[in-house]
Amino acid sequence: MFLSEPAMPMSSGDDIASSADEDDFICNTSETLFAAIEKCLDNGLGSCLVVEGKRLVGRISLDDIARAVHGGALLKPGLDHFMATFADRRRNDVSREKDVLRPIVDDYGHLLGVSIERSDEFVQVARPDMSHLEFRAVLDAFLSSWISSKGPYVERFEDEFRAFVGSAHGVAVTNGTVALHLALVALGIGPGHEVIVPDLTFAATINAVLYCGATPVIVDVDPVTWCMSLATVKAACTSRTKAIIPVHLYGRPAEIGPIVQCARERGIFVIEDCAEAHGARYEGRPVGQFGDIGCFSFYANKIVTTGEGGMCLTSDPAIAKSLRVLRDHGMTPSRSYWHERVGFNYRITNLQAAIGQAQLWRIESILARNSTIARLYEVAMRDIPGVRFPPQMDSKSMPVVWLTCVQVPEAARNEILSRALEARLEMRPFFHTLSSLPLYEKYARDYQHSARLAATGICLPTQRGVDHQVVDRVAAVFRAVLA
């Protein structure tokens, strides 16, 4: 993300993040491929300019390096050898106008500075943010030969993430959907039981209930929090209600304290779906530690990612033990290949956990970056009629930015999304409501708040490549349609 003062001389209108040092954009031919990889990762562009002394001789990208590694480049890892032997000269033409990273040179070919030009770049709504920390961790895990579900990074990731949220136990699993399913099974949810879920959520929430043979009960969401509320939960509870799954949607905490208290009084389990809310808080406490089990996703577009992955958190040792047994085929830990329960192969790999642990070291900076991007959008779009940013939450709730969200008039939304793609900008509509999907219609009623949000919501690009230039491009699309 390039949002602050330039670290090198730059052309007018460009922005460079304070986290990016000038050296991150430049490799010398005396350096190694490993140094080039780490710089291409850390600068967020996936490429560097290559100099010999002060003279600009080419550019290098992660794609170039990947191809060269397949050709044996690491056997002679010097960048000078790489540039001379493996790089396609046409791909390393330093004057390519479509590159985001552009050199500023003098008449002698000496590099004076860099320019970041995103006016025509295709910008995805979300991208994994990888640095040299993740690269070193996954390389360490690979070289250890522990590449499956055994290995030290799994336990480290579980321990550090559960400590981040404030739970006693962490059980890492294959993905976020698996986390929800495992939680329901561990709590004994099955046929004859009802589970309350919100209408506005990703389908994984309700699918996990159906995996267990239980009956989902869909409730409307609150127009301010965008999540289920205490009132909707109370109205939906019956003698068959066995569990509630509040979803902290788009980083916004549900009314989780009162919901949990209500559930406790009725002997109902609470499973928090925190897939989109790493670091969000309610009454000063991180979400994920309120319910019986907190479930997180580490999919590639999430705040913390392992590519695919998830985790169940709990402070109950008996539940934690059950989760671990069920995750590993139902095997008794003290007796190899002895199965006393029907379990699942829901284990995360050591390679994934290595990435996750390194991501967790950087979570505060990632959250701060996303928050900064959201503020940039608010400033750039505050004068555009019809654009509404998320409602302010009460003092009990501290949301985080997963993706920057806005609402627009329903009649204009599809045109905005279409024009955004024409402008090489990826935006996403909000999730379809569960009640609108034929697959779940037998569990649904008319839910006006969730339907309104689903019809008017747009998720804006929120990732490291978003700077003032991208924000202005996004605002121009909205302004062209709405103003």
Image (spheres, rainbow, N blue to C red):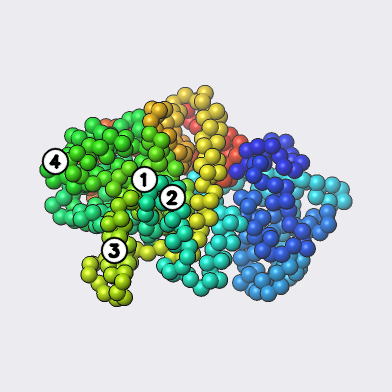
Q: Earlier in the sequence, mark 1 or mark 2?
A: 2
The residues bearing labels 3 and 2 have C-alpha atoms spaced at a distance of: 23 Å
Q: Earlier in the sequence, mark 3 or mark 2?
A: 2
* Figure check: 40 above or below 446: below
**Which residue is the site of mark 1?**
288
**Which residue is the site of mark 3?**
326
Position of residue 126 in the picture relative to residue 312 (left or right): right
Residue type at mark 4? Thr
Residue 56 is situated, as x and y percent measured from the top left of the image, at 80, 55
Residue 454 is situated, as x and y percent measured from the top left of the image, at 34, 37
Residue 163 — which label?
2
Q: Earlier in the sequence, mark 4 or mark 3?
A: 4
Q: Are marks 2 and 4 in contact (CB under 8 Å)?
A: no
Q: Secondary structure at mark 3?
A: helix
Residue type at mark 3? Leu
Front-lying residue, 267 or 470 = 267
The residues bearing labels 1 and 2 have C-alpha atoms spaced at a distance of: 11 Å
Front-lying residue, 36 or 282 = 282
At 35% from the left and 33% from the top, the residue drawn is 225
Q: Secondary structure at mark 1?
A: loop
Residue 449 is situated, as x and y percent measured from the top left of the image, at 29, 32
At 30% from the left and 60% from the top, the residue drawn is 321
Going by the picture, which residue comes out furthest to the right?
Answer: 108
Crowd band around label 3 with a 10 angstrom C-alpha radius: few (<14), some (14–19), many (20+): many
Q: Earlier in the sequence, mark 1 or mark 4?
A: 4
Residue type at mark 2? Ala
Q: Secondary structure at mark 4?
A: loop
Residue 238 — which label?
4
Residue 426 — which label?
none
The residues bearing labels 1 and 4 have C-alpha atoms spaced at a distance of: 25 Å
